[in-house]
Image: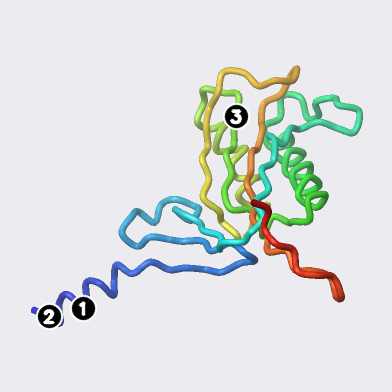
Amino acid sequence: MEGSRTDLSTRRRTTVTRTSAVSLIRSRSLSDVAEYAYAATAPAGSRLIFLAGSCPLDEHGDTVAVGDYAGQAAKAVENLRTALADAGASVQDVISTRVLVASARQEDLVTAWAVVRDSFGDHDVPSTLMGVTVLGYADQLVEIEAVAAVLDTPASGDPARLPSA
């Protein structure tokens, strides 16, 4: 009997992948149909970066790829990468996403999701995909929210940064 418990617990053990400060957790107790990790953690002392929704806007603030879910998702990912870089992070530091798609049609959500998922490669962070009625900009169909976690190291010769109280 003890041996069968060990076998069961071994099969149900979760897999943890460390990427950057982020550990992605894939539960073997839940369905493997999802194309993302079910959970993610970051160690104490990580600097969290909360990104506003990344929209499919060009440098002039105009919505691009009007009527094109994949095109808008691609531009939103591009803008997300820029915001991450400006905050000292990359997609490898993202700990979760929420993808908002202005549509009631599942195929439109899946079209946008495929672009977002593919842009993250093997870093398949926990994500929520939601169909919504409308988004904030004219002709906007896609928006991507994200949270990232980074471990800052002081530059050579700089004193270590202490967390603020």
Q: In which quarter of the image is residue 152?
A: bottom right
The residue shown at (57%, 48%) is 96
Q: Is residue 43 above or below residue 52?
A: below
Residue 74, image x and y in percent?
73, 41
| Amino acid type for the residue under numbered disc 2 | Glu
CB atoms of marks 1 and 2 within 8 Å:
yes
User: Percent position (x, y) of residue 52?
Assistant: 70, 36
Helix, strand or loop status at disc 3? strand
Disc 3 vs disc 2: which is toward the camera?
2
Q: Decide: is 78 above or below 107.
A: below
The picture quadrant where one finds residue 58 is top right
Residue 16 in the figure: left or right of residue 73: left
Q: Where is residue 30 in the image (x, y as percent from the top left)?
A: 33, 55
- Residue at x-position 68% and y-position 37%: 70
Nearest to the observer: residue 117 or residue 163: 163
Which one is earlier in the sequence, the residue at label 1 or at label 3?
1
Q: Quick check: marks 1 and 3 in contact, CB under 8 Å?
A: no
Q: In which quarter of the image is the N terminus?
A: bottom left
Q: Residue at (74%, 44%) from the top-left corner?
A: 80
Question: Which residue is most to the bottom?
Answer: 3
Question: In what element is the residue under mark 1?
Answer: helix
**Label 1 to label 3: alpha-carbon separation:** 44 Å
Which residue bears the numbered disc 2? 2
If you read the primary sequence from the N terminus, does the residue marked by circle 3 or circle 2 appear first?
A: 2
For residue 25, side relative to residue 89 (left or right) = left
Furthest residue to the left? 1
How many other residues sit within 10 Å of disc 1, few (<14), some (14-19) or many (≥20)?
few
Q: Name the residue under label 1.
A: 6
From the image, tell me which residue sits under label 3.
101
| Residue drawn at x 35%, y 62% as measured from the top left | 28
Q: Residue 160 carries which label?
A: none
